[in-house]
Amino acid sequence: MSTPVGAGRYAPSPSGDLHLGNLRTAVLAWALARGSSRAFHLRIEDLDRVREGAEQRQLEDLAALGLDWDGEVVRQSERGAAHRAALDALTAQGLVYECYCTRREILEAPSAPHAPPGAYPGTCRDLAPAAREAGRERMRALRREPALRLRAGTDAWSVQDLWAGQVHGTVDDLVLRRGDGVVAYNLAVVVDDAAAGVDQVVRADDLLSSAPRQAYLAHLLGLPAPSYAHVPLAVNARGDRLAKRDGAVTLRDRFDRGESTAQVMGRIGDSLGIPGCGTAADVLTRWDPASLVREPWVVELPD
Ligand code: GLU
């Protein structure tokens, strides 16, 4: 086997069983990595929303579908030292400040002039020392730590997405460490992908708008930005994001309904316009990424 060039990955949050949309994204992440001679890694994003036993079940389901991965599975919760080192590096560059805002205050604050909707308005960016002390006092009373935010030097950044093309999206003073002391997802993902040599990020397209922020963070940390491929979400018949309450949407649910792995792979293949798939390897050999329909996948299941 030739030495892999770069790596792809799948990075589920262990909050429950993977549904068909998650499984499809995982299969595509694997197929894109393997189809380009990359390594493929799994990372469990367990900084919050952990459900007992979910990680093991997710790994079993991915293996049942025929996905294989290289090296040990990485758990984000075990990467604290690397996350702290990145935070320290940004702090050393003068790019980190404490934020004392509550979620509600941010929602209610008038947005800064020219700032895109939803961007942090910069309330705590340039506080005088006395106002900072008052903020810290308030945090102590709330028994919370101040969040740490990035002092962003731009309000937009560009990334390259396999399907969306060049995406020029909002960058704001994003949170780097949350008020509960946990490193923020946007920082963890950048640090962990780079440490694993990941240069191809495949995930659901609800995270497309996060990609410019993450690529900008990588730039500040002196890390190469990966290429991106954001896969359309799976939705139910009403067009809402697929969820457990939509019925038998996980692999085990499908097994309980008498379906085989091959039939579930067949559903995933059908959604990609390649009928007759029975294994992940079929997707790898038969799927043309350029043919991906960029609309959400409407999952229609028999009762
Ligand atoms: N853990 C995230 C999720 O399950 C994915 C994050 C990523 O792939 O960057 O939605």
Image: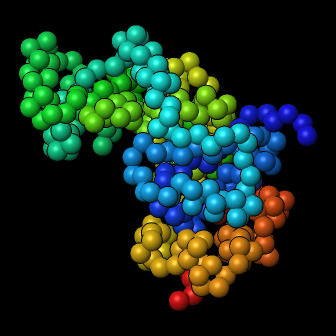
For the view shown, which residue lies furthest in the bottom direction?
Answer: 303
Indicate whether 34 appears above or below 119.
Answer: below
Between 85 and 60, the residue placed more toward the observer is 60
x and y, in percent, of residue 260 in the image = 71, 78
Residue 110, image quadrant:
top left
63 displayed left or right of 2:
left
Decide if residue 296 is in sight here. no
Residue 288, image quadrant:
bottom right
241 displayed left or right of 293:
left
Residue in view at x 78 percent, y 67 percent: 279
Between 22 and 200, the residue placed more toward the observer is 22
Residue in view at x 57 percent, y 61 percent: 57
x and y, in percent, of residue 222 in the image = 56, 18
Indicate whether 218 appears above or below 265.
Answer: above
Structure colour scheme: rainbow
Q: Quadrant of the N terminus?
A: top right
Picture mark count: 0
For the view shown, which residue lies furthest in the right direction?
Answer: 1
Decide if residue 258 is in sight here. yes
2 displayed left or right of 113:
right
Residue 180, image quadrant:
top left
x and y, in percent, of residue 226 in the image = 63, 34
x and y, in percent, of residue 208 in the image = 51, 47
Residue in view at x 34 percent, y 30 percent: 177
Indicate whether 299 appears above or below 62.
Answer: below
Indicate whether 67 appears above or below 105.
Answer: below
Residue in view at x 85 percent, y 33 percent: 3
Between 37 and 60, the residue placed more toward the observer is 60
